[in-house]
Image: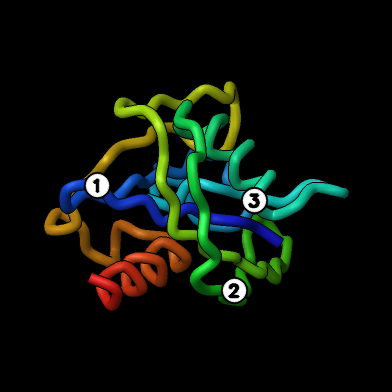
Amino acid sequence: MSAYALALREGRVLLARLSDASPVFEPGLWHLPGGGIDHGEQPVQALERELREETGLDLVEARLVDSRAYTAQRDGVHWHLIALFYAVRLAGEVPEVVEVAGSTEAVEWIPLAALDETMLSPAAADGLRWLAAEA
């Protein structure tokens, strides 16, 4: 189970590019900031922790807006992922990857107009469709 952030500012969405350490989705794809919920952790606590690790930004507000199930196979492992999507408000302007050797190699505010689905993980594509429907 994972928690992901849908963060939008001035026509740009916050995305994290997956590294070779990505366990589920292909490295190099842009993905939503967030990740796995640790044992005993509440989803919003996981989201807050993951945002700090992957973006260096602080969570101010989070509202659960959607959930999806995904299946994938990577490196011989079959994955079943439940993703919780949160519309978020963040403190801070310039994102930077804080976690060393994690599943994120870069993080950026990317203009929505510059994205197409071939650049995105399935979860990021679904999140962007939700953002577009809400706009």
Residue at image position (60%, 47%) is: 47
Residue at image position (30%, 57%) is: 119
Q: Quadrant of residue 14?
A: top left
Quadrant where the image shows the C terminus: bottom left
Front-most of residues 35 and 70? 35
Element at badge 3? Answer: helix
Q: Amino acid at mark 2?
A: Tyr
15 sits left or right of 26 in the view:
left
Distance of label 1 from label 3 (alpha carbons): 21 Å
Q: Nearer the viewer, mark 1 or mark 2?
A: 1
Q: Amino acid at mark 1?
A: Arg
Element at badge 2? Answer: strand
Q: Amino acid at mark 3?
A: Val
Residue 44 marker = 3
Element at badge 1? Answer: strand
Disc 3 crowd rating (10 Å Cα; few below 14, some 14-19, many 20+) is many
Distance of label 2 from label 3 (alpha carbons): 20 Å
| Residue matched to label 1 | 9
Q: Quadrant of residue 116?
A: bottom left
Question: Residue 104 at what x, y percent from top left?
Answer: 50, 37
| Residue matched to label 2 | 70
Quadrant where the image shows the N terminus: bottom right
**Callout count:** 3
